[in-house]
Amino acid sequence: MKEIFNKNMFDILFIAETKIDKTISSSLISQPGFRTVRKDCKKGAGGLLAYIRADISVYRRAKLARARRFRDYLLRH
């Protein structure tokens, strides 16, 4: 993963089925130059993680987030 981040191969990266929960600190999964957005799993299933290049402006669409559509959670501004 570090090689992918170091080569700047993407602007936004989504990772599904992370199995990450509140026991994993954000500092463990953060990467320099990227903002991290996470939706932790519940009961050992699911979990989503997004890495967004720090210079891309995004905002949260609360109405869609409540609808559980994480892919629509972030939009370029």
Image (cartoon, helix red, strand yellow):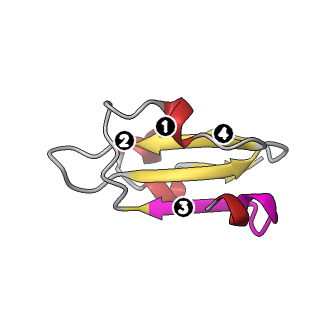
Please name the residue that numbered disc 4 is placed on. Answer: 59
Up-down: is 4 above or below 50? below
Please name the residue that numbered disc 2 is placed on. Answer: 66
Circles 2 and 4, Cβ within 8 Å, touching? The answer is no
**How many C-alpha atoms fall within 10 Å of the one at disc 2: few (<14), some, or many (≥20)?**
few
SS of the residue under disc 1: helix
The x and y percentages for residue 3 are 71, 64
SS of the residue under disc 2: helix
Please name the residue that numbered disc 3 is placed on. Answer: 14
Q: Which dot, 4 or 3, sits closer to the camera?
A: 3
Residue at the (60%, 41%) spot, across then down: 36
Circles 1 and 2, Cβ within 8 Å, touching? The answer is yes
Q: Which dot, 3 or 2, sits closer to the camera?
A: 3
SS of the residue under disc 3: strand
Q: The residue under label 4 is which amino acid type?
A: Tyr
Q: The residue under label 3 is which amino acid type?
A: Phe
Residue situated furthest right in the rendering: 55
Residue bounds of the magenta highlight = 5-15
Q: Nearer the viewer, residue 3 or 12?
A: 3
**How many discs mark residues in the rendered view?**
4
Q: Which dot, 3 or 1, sits closer to the camera?
A: 3
Residue at the (47%, 42%) spot, across then down: 38
The x and y percentages for residue 39 are 40, 43
Q: Nearer the viewer, residue 71 or 66?
A: 71
